[in-house]
Image (cartoon, grey):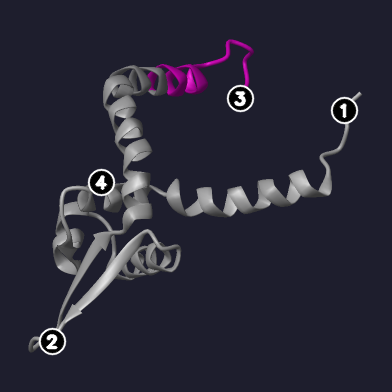
Amino acid sequence: MDMPASPAVSAQCHKVGKVLAIVGDKWTVMIVRILIERPHRFNEIKRTVGGISQQMLTRTLKALERDGMVSRTVYPTVPPQVEYALTKLGQSLAVPVRALGAWAGEHIDEIENNRARYDQDKHAPTGRGGSE
């Protein structure tokens, strides 16, 4: 018999889910990987990530700053230069991000082959004389 989760466990799962929503986001992973080596300016991050809109990059950096994983430093130049860096908390996130990246790199060929086989099987005629 399944027992419902206690309210404390349910609340903790909800909190963890909110954190995972930001740290597990593909843009967050890419940005953290870029900032592991050194601080970067906004446009450097945008060029390096590729495919991210200015709005999405801004939104992701603000979320990471709000969570204390990224610091934002404004230099008094004309125009002002803004630099983003990982905080101590952000550096700790770099450890699982590196591991996840290594895992993905190690298994990407297998995953792509599985996707192709799955897609081919799903679109193959069923032999039942009709569509699914």
Q: Nearer the viewer, mark 2 or mark 1?
A: 2
Marks 2 and 4, how far apart at CA:
27 Å
Q: Earlier in the sequence, mark 1 or mark 4?
A: 1
Residue 29 placed where, x, y %? 34, 47
Q: Which mark is residue 33?
A: 4
Marks 1 and 4, how far apart at CA:
40 Å
Q: Quadrant of residue 4?
A: top right
Marks 2 and 3, how far apart at CA:
65 Å
Tell whether position 60 is magenta. no
Instruction: Identify residue type, mark 2.
Output: Pro
Residue underneath mark 3: 131
Residue 57, visible in the rendered structure: no
Residue 123, visible in the rendered structure: yes
Q: Which mark is residue 110?
A: none
Residue underneath mark 2: 76
- Answer whether labels 2 and 3 touch (C-beta < 8 Å): no
Residue underneath mark 1: 2
18 lies left or right of 90:
right
